[in-house]
Image: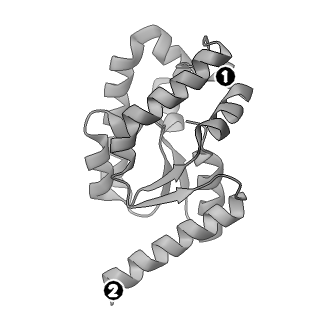
Amino acid sequence: MGSGKTTIGKTLAFNLNQKFYDLDNKIIDYTKESIYELFELYGEKKFRKLEYNILYNFLKKKKYYIFSVGGGTPCYQNNILLMKKYSKIVYLKAEINTLFYRLLKEKENRPLISKLSNNDLYNFIGDSLNKRLCFYKKADSTIDIDKKSILDIVKEIISFYVLCFIKKNF
């Protein structure tokens, strides 16, 4: 949440001449409801089940893609195992302060944080990172994004994929 997955994913896809997909957009296309509305109408538990089904169906069908998922996605319904089976995972790691200042600007558009005070938001980010870290550590690569440009991050991801290709083929 707030690490720039969509922005970096789009830039990466452009640089690699690949299609970019965003799981939230896939969910919105399928349900015709915003993520915020889905959380409000059905709660997080039902949302996560829907998220898993859409993720599963997408990963089984697609071969070459850049795909961005929400920060909570790897932590539910064995999604991390599903993602590892069908793809390489890059964790975009950011410090709490970086995430806090980014999320503060777009708080009203994010259902899990829209009603939090600034202090509660900071604590929520810290708590979420602590709970999610064991899942994030299962990523195939971790890239620290603090104080780096989008292009520098994209170059690191491309370097990781080149290494994966070399290891697999030579």
Residue type (three-letter) at the residue carrying disc 1: Lys
Residue 169's disc number: 2
Query: In this orientation, does residue 6 appear?
Result: yes
Residue 22's disc number: none
Nearer-the-camera pick, 147 or 39: 147
Q: Secondary structure at mark 2?
A: helix
Quarter of the rendering containing residue 80: top left
Mark 1 → mark 2, Cα distance in angstroms: 44 Å
Query: In this orientation, does residue 14 appear?
Result: no
Residue beneath label 1, please? 107
Nearer-the-camera pick, 29 or 56: 56
**Total count of labels:** 2
Nearer-the-camera pick, 123 or 159: 123
Considering only vertical position in the picture, is 32 above or below 153? above
Whether residue 167 sits left or right of residue 70 in the image: it is left
- Quarter of the image with the C terminus is bottom left
Bin the neighbour count of mark 2 within 10 Å (Cα to Cα): few under 14, some 14-19, many 20 and up: few
